[in-house]
Each structure stands twice: as C-alpha cells, then as structure tokens.
Amino acid sequence: MSGVCRGLSSSSVKILTEATPLSGFPWFVSARNMFHKARIPNAIFEERSKEHEKYGGDPEQPHKLHIVTRVKSAMRRPYWEKEMVKHLGLDKLHSPVIHKNTPAVNSQLKFIKHLVRIQPLRTPYGIPAEHDIGNTFINSKGELIVRRLLQPVDPKALES
C-alpha cells in the first residue's frame, strides 16, 4: 500500500481530479439519479390487497397456519439469519414446517423472507380428526390432504 502511495505524486492526483468532474467518468453514476420514481415501475406503488385474489386468500379472514419452506442456503448470511433459520426449525432445505400465523412468528419470518417460501395451509377436506392425523400429508399446492382409511363393513349388513 505504501509503495503505491509513494508512486503517486500529489501533482498527478491533482491533475486527475481537476481534469474532469466526477460525472465525466463513465463508471460514475450518481445515486440521486438512480432511484427516483420514474425508474421504479408503477406496479410497486399499487395496493397489495389485489394479490389476495391471486393467492386465494381473504383479507377479512386470514389463514391460521403457514407452510414455511427454506429454498435458499443460509451460508454466507449474517449470524442473526442463521439463528432465525435454526430457531424456526428450517434446518433442512426444501422440507416444509408448519407455523402459526401470529405477529410474533411473522416478525421472525420477515428477517429471512429472502431465504424461505411461505404458503397458507389450506384444508379442502376439513380439519382431520385425531385418529386421521397419522394419515395426512401436505401436497405441493399447500393443501392438507387426509387419506381416510376404509372402515370394515358390518357382517350383519352383508347378510341382508
């Protein structure tokens, strides 16, 4: 570092700065010009309530459970994101975990939203009974499917 600094004389540095202003360099882009409303698409400024229909949600009655799936690695991420991933039980990649839709959980998910996919848990066949819990699975659409076991028919019904 000191060798590089010795090689530059104060006159050469002066010539570089006085020759052209900073805006004359092709690699220099002013931050003021980059982020103004004209370059940002108008879709970002629209209301988000229109997306409830897209995802099948109702703003009046939000879903009770989230299906949270980690889709990106937590390597090379800050320690607080790694701790949050571990705390929420998202250790394995692409394995879904169910969490309640509460403000406490949502504030934790906000920190790692770029690492996870969040879907509402839908129950098209109703909430399963206790004896059906072992025969349930979540499909790729975020629906809780209950495989109901067939009950044996009474032998008295067969005789008649």
Image (tube, rainbow, N blue to C red):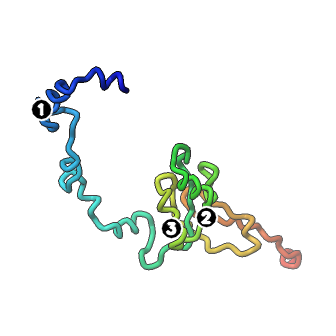
| Callout 2 amino acid | Ile
Other-residue count near label 2 (Cα within 10 Å), few / some / many at <14 / 14–19 / ≥20 = some
Q: Please state which of the two labelled residues, at mark 2 or mark 1, is closer to the viewer.
A: 1
Q: Which residue is mark 1?
A: 18
Q: Residue at x 57, y 69 (%)?
A: 65
Q: Please state which of the two labelled residues, at mark 3 or mark 1, is closer to the viewer.
A: 1
Image-quadrant location for residue 30 = top left
Q: Which residue is mark 3?
A: 106
| Callout 1 amino acid | Glu
Q: Is residue 111 left or right of residue 30?
A: right
Position of 108 relative to 15 (above/below): below
Q: Nearer the viewer, residue 136 or 119?
A: 119
Position of the N terminus by quadrant: top left
Q: Which residue is mark 2?
A: 98
Q: Which mark is residue 91?
A: none
The image shows residue 38 at horizontal and vertical percentages of 18, 53
Element assignment for label 3? helix
The image shows residue 73 at horizontal and vertical percentages of 55, 46
Element assignment for label 2? strand
Q: Please state which of the two labelled residues, at mark 2 or mark 3, is closer to the viewer.
A: 3
Element assignment for label 1? helix
> What whole-number distance in Å separates the C-alpha atoms at marks 3 and 1?
53 Å
**Dot 3 or dot 1, earlier in sequence:** 1
Q: Residue at x 52, y 54 (%)?
A: 116
